[in-house]
Amino acid sequence: MPRADRFRWAACQLDALENCLEYRTLQNTLASLPNTLDETYSRILHGIPSEYKRNAIRILQFLTYSERPLRIEEAVDAIAVDTEESQYFNPRYRMPNPQEITCFCSSLVVLVSTTHDSNDKNEEGMKLQLAHFSVKEYLTSERLDKDVAHNFQEVAARASVATACLAYLLHLDQNIRIEKIKEMFPLAQYSARYWMDHAAMAEGKDEKLQGF
């Protein structure tokens, strides 16, 4: 295992051990640690609780195929979009504590401090990004287990991102001033800027996207 992968493997194992609240669990976890980074990532993906999977996949699709990390406010709105509902986006479904967003796919994503321009001012904030370059390399490889691989094939993932962006934009009130939209709907600027780039990769290949 290359040195960079060994460090990353060790970091993931430490994350797993942090969840051990008593000695018996610690012993069992130590005895069953995966041997490779691929096995580690596979275990993390399969260990995501079923009630978290939808949001975890949405987050990982965005971060794997987006041109940039997401600001935490953008990520929160991205997972609040539900294209199966008649109202695609409802602000009341935003996470009450945005920083808990890493819990959906712990060890695969991280929050980092950042400075961004807002109304000609530099403002401190947080952005969500993949925890390591090897996460993207794994998710876009042919080494994923078949039961999750289809979610991260480029056409399917980009179609999912484009659909979420379009659904979000369709929710916006056209009578609100642009400055207010940016303030009230953090994902709007990203969606308007990038939805077409994602859609172009999936053009004619995704029925759900074609239906929007």
Image (spheres, rainbow, N blue to C red):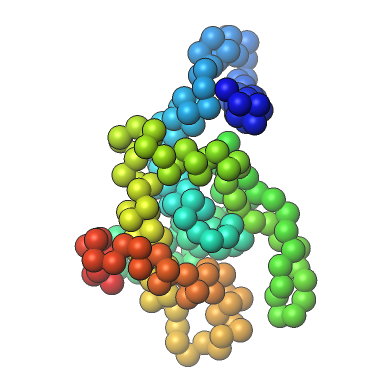
* Residue 81, picture quadrant: bottom left
Residue 75 x/y as whole percent? 54, 58
Query: Total marks drawn?
Result: 0
Side (left or right) of 211 relative to 141: left
Q: Residue furthest front?
A: 2
Side (left or right) of 61 relative to 95: left
Q: Residue at x 30, y 35 (%)?
A: 146
Q: Residue at x 58, y 13 (%)?
A: 30
* Residue 134, picture quadrant: top right
Quick one: quadrant of the N terminus? top right
Residue 205 x/y as whole percent? 24, 61
140 and 184: which is toward the camera: 140
Q: Residue at x 59, y 57 (%)?
A: 69
* Residue 180, picture quadrant: bottom right
123 and 94: which is toward the camera: 123
Residue 74 x/y as whole percent? 55, 63
Q: Is 118 situated above or below 135?
A: below
Q: Residue at x 44, y 41 (%)?
A: 139
- Res. 121 in view: yes
75 and 149: which is toward the camera: 149
Residue 72 x/y as whole percent? 61, 58
Q: Is 32 situated above or below 145?
A: above
Quick one: quadrant of the C terminus? bottom left
- Res. 188 in view: no
